[in-house]
Image (cartoon, rainbow, N blue to C red):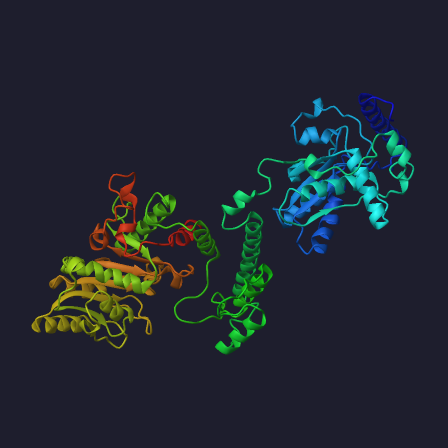
Amino acid sequence: MGGRSSSHRAGCRRITRIIIKTSKRRCAQKNPKFYGVNQYDNPYNADAYEKTLGPEIWSQTEGAVTHFVAGGSTGGTITGTGRYLKSVDPTIKIVLADPKGSVLWDYFVNDIPEEELVAKSWEVEGVGKDSIPGVLDTEYIDGAVMGDDSSSFRMVRTVAESSGVLLGGSSGLNLHAARVLSSHIKEGTIVTVLCDSGVKYLSKIYNDEWLQAKNLDKPLADVSKYEVHWKNGSHEVTEDEENDSLWGREQEEKELRFLDEVATHMVEYHRNSIRATEPVSVYNSPADLHASFEEMGVPLNFRSGESPISINNLTTAMNAVLDNSVRSSHPMFMNQLYAGVDPIALAGEWASSALNSNVHTFEVAPILTEIERSMLAKIASLWLGENADGSAPDHDGLFVPGGSIANLYSMILARERACPEAKKTGMPQGYVAFCSEQSHYSYKKCAHMIGLGMDNMIKVDCGKNGAMLPEALEAAIAAAKAAGKTPFYCGATAGSTVLGAYDPFAALADVCAKDNVWLHVDGAWGGAALVSKQHKHLMNGVERADSFCWNPHKLLGIPLQCSIVLSRHAGEFMAANSYKADYLFQPDKNNTEADLGDRTIQCGRKSDALKLWLPGEYRG
């Protein structure tokens, strides 16, 4: 071969392949049972490596492999192995080792069309190509290292001299590429394959005279002579890039794989919960829990100077958290006022967390803002009834973190109407509010939080069914006025915590209207009757209230937390809560009217509306 030109040798290779293909066709014509393997174009070639070599590498390195190096040859080894490795860890880099003269380099690196490729000569056998194998899929190849005959042969001679192992030239090329690659990365685990034996090459590679005649008897060249070409987007992270990031890309990908595993596991956890394949809970005392987590190497308490735990330990810890938690979606979970998670709503909860958007300004949460406004309009229509044209009635509102906070908002709105100066100067003495003796304890806490004082939240008597007595409210208001007090707020209940009582809203509204008392209905639990044809009558008269709150996380299976507070008076939330922080709520910016943040007492606010909107769209 040494005396022939490059073009002559390339032409010989093509002719040989044509002859082989022609022979196979003739064999097939003569014998219908003939099967031609055609390893260059047979997809099973790559499939075999995907099912064998890829898993073997992953298992033997215990997932530590970061780079895999292989020659092009038939395309099966690098394609199949690369496909598997990237399926378990997309950050693993697949590097093509190609001899100088092969067309694969020009095809992958220089983007030369296949029909324009021209092969040259090389001596390393079993690797490199004069055409592109059909099996080769460059989608899985991230980079390439060019080798040459001299470097490949010197590598195998070095291995033979140091280890007594006889390798062929293809193995030498892979080792050469791995050696070059190692000089271009800061750390990692490089895996390559020793794919051929040197026994067939005793008269060539291991023959000094043959090497000298070919002018290949050269010392191992410095790696700086060789480059690693990276496909766009696949380059190794530079030191500057690494320093510019809190997390390296490889570490980041490991954490994303952990997230992927957790997501899959959480779906299975939810499935097991709703199908009752596991117990509701397994009781452990606080001491038991601390001891258990200590034993697994993930103590519950943080200690100074402790090293971070590994991803594997983190997975163990996550599983332990699930195992030691109460399955609230279990059919036998019967704790207070919430149970079961709608899987569509759960998807909304996960999406909301992944988006990590703050629903305070339209520009940072555009679609989430509009979803919240849409859901508020829908719930206002359920509460107050639609307009004649099908549109929502006048209203104002927010999604808030729980029914207690919803009740707090209602008291702030009532205070704004009764004593607007309280927003700046504080609430003066003499104001009183009312709630039933069966109402939620948050009413008393809210009285404390707005500066009213718990003693000024007056409990009103209830009847035998647990509902507030209108005549008792009327008497309490009269007594307060006689004592020189100013009644300004009444908190009614739709579905009391213990008895499930519904107050007589219309009669209470009549009483409150006489003295301009703000009527709020806490429907955190029982407000769900609005969407029930059978039980909607329990909410009769609720449309006369000034404000209303509801927790879909209680009876609708929406993940905690999902709570709404509404006022029938448009603009009330802005009037009561606005501070007009000019770094967020500029009056001259686009879509300023869509901002929700200045209506709230919060700044950071999660998109809880999404997890209600999704099942609403799906289930109607």
- Left or right, 343 with reference to 33: left
Front-most of 34 and 132? 132
- What quarter of the picture does the N terminus occupy? top right
Q: Position of residue 188 (x, y in %)?
A: 65, 49
- Left or right, 202 with reference to 331: right
Front-most of 545 and 577? 577
Q: Position of residue 443 (x, y in %)?
A: 25, 68
Q: Is residue 302 above or below residue 420?
A: below
- The number of callouts visible is 0
The part of the image, by quadrant, that contains residue 2 is top right
Q: Position of residue 75 (x, y in %)?
A: 74, 37
Q: Is residue 536 above or below residue 578?
A: below
The reply to whether residue 541 is visible in this rendering is no
- Left or right, 511 with reference to 203: left
- Identity of the residue drawn at 30% across and 62% down: 405
- Identity of the residue drawn at 18% across and 58% down: 423
The part of the image, by quadrant, that contains residue 230 is top right
- Identity of the residue drawn at 37% across and 53% down: 609
The reply to whether residue 546 is visible in this rendering is yes
Q: Position of residue 303 (x, y in %)?
A: 49, 69
Front-most of 561 and 207? 207
